[in-house]
Image (tube, helix red, strand yellow):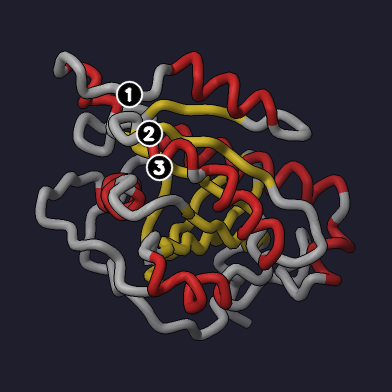
Amino acid sequence: MREREHDIFVKLLMVGNTGAGKSALLNRFSTGEYSTNIQPTIGIDFRNANMAVGEHRVRCQIWDTAGQERFRSITTSYFGGAMGLLLCYDISCRESFESVGYWARQARDHTGPGPIDIVLVGNKVDLAEAPGSRVVSEEEGRALAASFTPPVRFFETSAKQNLRTEHCFLSVVEDVVERILRDPTRARAAGRSPVRGGGGAAFGLEGSDPSCLTPPSCCTIS
């Protein structure tokens, strides 16, 4: 019998206004590369990553959602079953920061009744080097993260400089895995992979095929 490739399955969502740099962050995390030619996501896209969290092999499916208004009815239909959430905003765009509450509500309304682990991500921090470019301070980001109930983790990141890109993804995955380990029956009840002995399906989803890409040190992409 073929050995299972993972024993925990985690579904993550990346949400936020268009232009917040979600696709660039995911591309940097999954390929280790930064591109200036990434186009806005049309509807939804995803990547699969295999990583180790402690002694557990984790299959992580990361969904990158479009922030444009015209795609929102499409993207929310894919929110179901998400276990972790990366709430992203652009530190050089006040509107994207002020929309974080909207995206948090959308995620809570459409992911299902179970708990969801959240990290708040202030992206494009490399722009802070240019005078006048930063319009959302780090203190504001930390205050917003602390205002959640319960408070959520906060990271300022840069896909361009590869600053804390791995940390924000790994942080939410570790939180999800810790929660599953505390209550594996909840994961099974939601139709997800049990912690031990049950393995997990890749669900046969179609999307990006990053098999030719070089992953960062923390994970492999398939």
* Left or right placement of residue 38 versus residue 201 in this view: left
Look at the numbered disc 2 and give the secondary structure of its residue.
helix
Q: Circle 2 is placed at which residue position?
A: 94
Query: x and y percent of residue 115 in the render?
Result: 78, 52
What's the CA distance linking mark 1 and mark 3?
11 Å
Q: Amino acid at mark 2?
A: Arg
What's the CA distance linking mark 2 and mark 1?
6 Å
Q: Are marks 2 and 1 in contact (CB under 8 Å)?
A: yes
Query: x and y percent of residue 154 in the render?
Result: 54, 28
Say the numbered circle drawn on residue 135.
Answer: 1
Pick the front one: 208 or 100: 100
- Using the rendered view, name the quadrant where residue 189 is placed: bottom right
* Left or right placement of residue 148 versus residue 219 in this view: right
Q: Amino acid at mark 3?
A: Ser
What's the CA distance linking mark 3 and mark 2?
6 Å
Q: Are marks 3 and 2 in contact (CB under 8 Å)?
A: yes
Look at the numbered disc 1 and give the secondary structure of its residue.
loop
Residue at 70% x, 33% y is: 148
Say the numbered circle drawn on residue 96.
Answer: 3
- Count of numbered labels shown in the rendering: 3
* Left or right placement of residue 196 versus residue 167 in this view: right
Pick the front one: 166 or 118: 118
Q: Is residue 184 above or below residue 162?
A: below
- Using the rendered view, name the quadrant where residue 107 is placed: bottom right
- Using the rendered view, name the quadrant where residue 166 is placed: top left
Q: Is residue 164 above or below residue 28?
A: above
Residue at 48% x, 78% y is: 74
Q: Residues within 10 Å of mark 3 (few under 14, many from 20)?
A: many
Pick the front one: 176 or 133: 133
Residue at 59% x, 68% y is: 79
